[in-house]
């Protein structure tokens, strides 16, 4: 499970961190009771995209027991500076008999006034503690920062920081899984972001947690699609912003992964196959949604 958070630019560093060793000392402490942390995990991943705004830190935590409540803090292990405590329940083991609750939505940008109402409603639902949610799915058009800021890197970064703060009551309580949308990746629709900021802000299972290459030239890659099994489901996420035509790398992955998912269901290892994407793969009109929406069906 990957923990990711942001801080202001540390004033003890001579220049913005670029993901290299010993830039800062990010760490996660967690345990089974509030205020008592029996395990500490560290990394050397800290990165400030474009050299402005907040610094993103990432730490990978392993060995979690299924369906267990953990309490944790994040911070800097060398400076001994830590966040307020948060808590989450780890997802259940994989199996058709397991029960899993999750939250799903899309197009939830900070600029959209209704998003504040929705986010607060979800945060209130979480705080009531009636269900232990395993993750949130955000199926594209994450913050709309590029649409609002266009070529202004400072404004783009500020809007992303505001959006990340807005979703914190959700993302600190469960994994936040995303699919890429046109307002995250396409030129014009995403301003100057072209998928690079999306990759910086969110690390999904197919992306190495130490990856710091987010240039537009390399954004056409398998880092935009991924899958994993959790509880009774197989979650299959692919990109409608990259081609999935016959012969493409993504089409080959889709076929292979859904074949594996179908086999797992046939063998009784899962009960559900859930597919997450931004655009529909089949359309009733001729609009081309990046990957080539199939029409006339």
Image: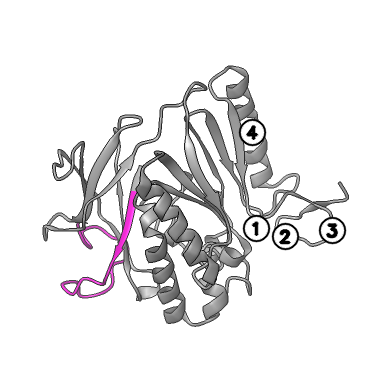
Find residue 271 and report its image quarter.
top right
Q: Which residue is mark 2?
A: 289
Name the residue: 43% across, 67% down: 163
3D distance between C-alphas at marks 1 and 4: 19 Å
Discs 2, 1 touching: Cβ within 8 Å: yes
Of the residues under marks 2 and 1, which one precedes in the sequence?
A: 1
User: Disc 2 vs disc 4: Cβ atoms closer than 8 Å?
Assistant: no
- Secondary structure under the numbered disc 3 in the rendered image: loop
* Comparing labels 3 and 4, the label whose residue is closer to the camera: 3
x 40%, y 54%: residue: 124
Prevailing SS of the magenta stretch = loop
Q: Which residue ends up furthest to the bottom in the rendered image?
A: 152
Query: Is 18 contained in the magenta span?
Result: yes
Which is nearer the eye, 144 or 133? 133
Count of numbered marks = 4
What span is in magenta? Answer: 3-26
The x and y percentages for residue 25 are: 19, 57
Q: Earlier in the sequence, mark 1 or mark 4?
A: 1
């Amino acid at each position: 499970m990957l923990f990711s958070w942001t801080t202001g630019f540390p004033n003890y560093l001579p220049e913005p961190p670029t993901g290299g060793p010993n830039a800062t000392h990010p760490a996660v402490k967690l345990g089974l009771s509030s205020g008592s942390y029996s395990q500490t995990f560290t990394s050397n991943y800290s990165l400030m995209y474009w050299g402005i705004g907040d610094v993103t830190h990432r730490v990978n935590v392993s060995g979690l027991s299924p369906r267990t409540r953990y309490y944790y803090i994040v911070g800097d292990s060398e400076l001994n500076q830590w966040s307020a405590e948060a808590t989450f329940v780890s997802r259940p083991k994989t199996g058709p008999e397991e029960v899993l609750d999750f939250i799903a939505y899309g197009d939830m940008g900070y600029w959209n006034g209704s998003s504040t109402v929705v986010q607060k409603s979800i945060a209130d639902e979480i705080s009531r503690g009636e269900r232990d949610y395993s993750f949130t799915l955000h199926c594209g058009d994450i913050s709309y920062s590029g649409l609002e800021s266009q070529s202004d890197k400072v404004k783009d970064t500020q809007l992303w920081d505001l959006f990340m703060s807005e979703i914190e009551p959700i993302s600190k309580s469960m994994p936040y899984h995303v699919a890429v949308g046109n307002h995250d990746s396409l030129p014009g629709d995403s301003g100057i972001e072209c998928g690079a900021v999306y990759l910086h802000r969110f690390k999904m299972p197919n992306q190495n947690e130490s990856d710091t290459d987010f240039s537009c030239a390399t954004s056409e890659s398998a880092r935009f699609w991924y899958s994993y099994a959790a509880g009774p489901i197989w979650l299959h996420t692919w990109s409608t912003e990259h081609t999935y035509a016959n012969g493409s790398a993504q089409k080959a992955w889709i076929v292979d992964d859904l074949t594996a998912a179908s086999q797992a269901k046939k063998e009784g290892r899962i009960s559900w196959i859930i597919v997450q994407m931004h655009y529909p793969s089949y359309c009733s009109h001729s609009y081309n949604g990046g990957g080539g929406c199939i029409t006339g069906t």
